[in-house]
Image: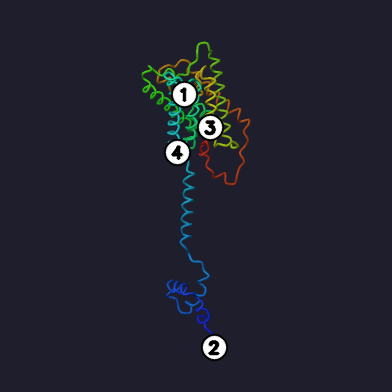
Amino acid sequence: MANTPSISEEFSPKLSPTKHTIMEVVSPKLSPTKHTIMEVVSPKLPLPTKYSIMEEAKASRSREFHINHDIPPSNLQKTVAELVGTYFLIFAGCAAALVNEVQTLTIVGIAIVWGLVLMAAIYALGHISGAHFNPAVTLALAAARKFSWKLVPMYLLAQLLGAALASLTLRVLFHDQGGIQATMTQYKDSTSDLEAITWEFIITFILMFNICAVATDHRASRDLAGVAIGATLLFNVIIAGPITGASMNPARSLGPAVVSGVYKNLWVFIVAPILGAMAATLVYSILRVPKPEKPDESTKSMYNELYIHPEV
């Protein structure tokens, strides 16, 4: 036993001064034997580093951001978004009709304004409220079970209020024109009520059918939904604007009517768009296929999908 070298005599000279100093700071209270054993084993143990701590903190912040990102907007936020979006839509579109009285824009220029403002509003507010801006769209999506009926009254009120405020603003800004009759959706006496209803039904059907196709179908790419819907509104205004005013939106007709006090043939622009939108959702339901389920589908929020905000 006397000739057998101790553990400290055999191994401790091989330890580097730096490692030896670290272990002396970490374990000064250990006995000499245990101290020597720790010196041999400790170089093989991974020590915590600043990098690993920073990475853990970064991962923690990333998880927190992911959780906050999935929080859906509140009902108040959706309502305000619908009010603001409808205001933008009616203000810009109807303003183009009033400007046309001063500087000729032609029906093509007016249609371009309608299409562009709708496209911009969809991209600005679609992730919050779904970007309806139209009572006919809201009612049709609710009837197709793509939107909660609980939110329908709030959406309709916000859309009508936004349209009325936009029309009132235009009346103040264009007071020199003696009114905002140029923004009214009317048709000539040579056009019958049935013809006007047919026109509004068809163009609203086309608009709503495209909304269903690009914004509510999981097979479609929603990146260009705003462009497709805005373009649909644009060519509808070009072809039907000179005949009926191309309403396609009860709020678009009700806002100027309430502010100007002219309600002639207003019922046509309320009934026909609603019927056309509902017919479009019914027809598109034939083309729709069930969405394939994924393992993580049960926890995925649907509130970020354009035009789809069901209550769960």
Which disc is residue 252 wearing? 1
- Which mark lies nearer to you, 4 or 1? 1
User: At label 2, which amino acid type do we have?
Assistant: Asn
- Where's residue 113, x and y in %? 48, 26
Say whether disc 4 or disc 1 marks the residue closer to the N-terminus: 4
In what element is the residue under mark 4? loop
Per the image, the residue denoted by label 3 is 227
Question: Which callout, 1 or 2, points at the residue further toward the start of the chain?
Answer: 2
Tell which of 93 and 161 is nearer to you.
93
Q: Which mark is residue 74?
A: 4
Q: Secondary structure at mark 1?
A: helix
Q: Nearer the viewer, mark 3 or mark 4?
A: 3
**Mark 2 — residue?**
3
Q: First in sequence: mark 4 or mark 2?
A: 2
Circle 4: is it few (<14), some (14-19), or many (20+) Cα within 10 Å? few
Q: Which mark is residue 131?
A: none
Q: Please rate how many residues cluster around mark 3, counting C-alpha atoms within 10 Å: few if below 14, some from 14 to 19, many from 20.
A: some
Instruction: Count residues near mark 1 (Cα–Cα under 10 Å), then give few for <14, some for 14-19, many for 20+.
Output: many
- Badge 3 amino acid: Val
